[in-house]
Amino acid sequence: MKEKLTLMIPGPTPVPQTVLQALGRHPIGHRSGEFQEIVLRTTEQLKWLHQTNSDVLTITGSGTAAMEAGIINTLSRGDRVLCGDNGKFGERWVKVAKAYGLDVKVIKANWGDPLDPEEFRKALQEDQNNNIRAVILTHSETSTGVINDLETISRYVQTNGTAITIADCVTSLGATNVPMDQWGLDVVASGSQKGYMMPPGLSFVAMSERAWEAQKRSDLPKFYLDLKSYQKTVQKNSNPFTPAVNLYFALEAALNKMQEEGLDAIFSRHDRHKKAAQAGMKAIGLPLYAAEGFGSPAITSVAPDIIDAEELRKVVKEKFDILLAGGQDHLKGKVFRIGHLGFVSDRDVLTAVAAIESTLQLLGINKNKTGEGLSAATAALQ
Ligand SMILES: *Cc1c(COP(=O)(O)O)cnc(C)c1O
């Protein structure tokens, strides 16, 4: 049943009916008073979501636009940066930084493992002349379902040298605690199709005072993504260009929903869903891909050794109308990923676990484990 297809991929994520309905209005003028009111309200709500007093700017573009904006507005040609890379999105940071001619030192971890904060501390302490301008990393590495210890790494940055911290929080913001000011993050990038429970199309960059100081020196080329123009216009509750007006309607509706639920409730819901997905997979006998204790609150990566992950995904989709994500690059066929980010309820997680379990049964694999995954996931939800 095609219309019943449930997205359990880490973006785009499911969108609530109220948010869809908000989208369906006729557009309004982006210089109108009515639109300015929306910019005013959503800007305040975005600060609430980021737990910050700093500017949070909205860009029409996908999450990568926010990442690129973070780099080109704070850095200069030839600047030395440390980039964390333990998956596809870490790789993306390295690519963006190199595309702008930065001097990139990569700190790697194997896919499935978290970045080691000690390696960042050492590199920062060895940098006697404070040449490192930025430490750039992904908080929740979507490709592997690993959460990196952004809090500790950010603390090391603050206590060693003068670098700023630039973080991709695309699949952590709105899923787990990312208190920007408390952790001392300088640039936080996110995108609408993830924890925001919205369609793709908007992205967000939060900039600390220190990030704006860095912006004054920055000489990398920019025009559409020049955040100074977004800062100037947001102060007048406006936008430098024609924004995706209808997505702003959706943004306000989505942020209203998030405020109704409350940050703590949102975070604990994601935590419970993570635990249920992990417990369910383990009970079925499917090994988790992320290192123990470092599973992302938004994505559970599973590395089945008893079945091709693509075959399992195909059957889960055809028989049970649930779209799981596959493995990327060398993980294709080896890993599948359960997205539990954003507008996800207990029912969705239980159904996904049951569908995976039933699929194995249908294929004649794992026959003696029937029901154990669902039972473990149910217990973990309590
Ligand atoms: C989805 C995602 C992005 C942004 O990707 P876009 O396709 O540009 O929206 C960036 N980082 C992570 C970790 C993501 O999951």
Image: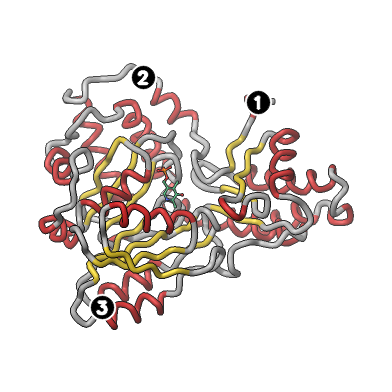
Residue 235 as seen in the image, left or right of residue 206: left
In this view, the residue in front, 195 or 312, is 312
**Looking at the image, which residue is at 52% across and 61% down?**
146
Q: Nearer the viewer, residue 120 or 382?
A: 120
The local secondary structure at tag 1 comes to helix
Kind of residue indicated by mark 3: Thr
Amino acid type at image mark 1: Lys
Q: Nearer the viewer, residue 275 or 295?
A: 295
Residue under circle 3? 159
> To which quarter of the image does residue 264 belong?
bottom left
Res 275 visible = yes
Where is residue 193 shown, x and y percent of the image? 44, 40
- Mark 1 or mark 3: name the one nearer the start of the chain: 1
Q: Would you name the residue on which mark 1 appears? A: 2
Residue at 25 percent of width and 48 percent of height = 56
Q: How many marks?
A: 3
Q: Position of residue 191 (x, y in %)?
A: 38, 44
Residue for badge 2: 25
Residue 8, above or below 119:
above
Q: Quadrant of the C terminus?
A: bottom right
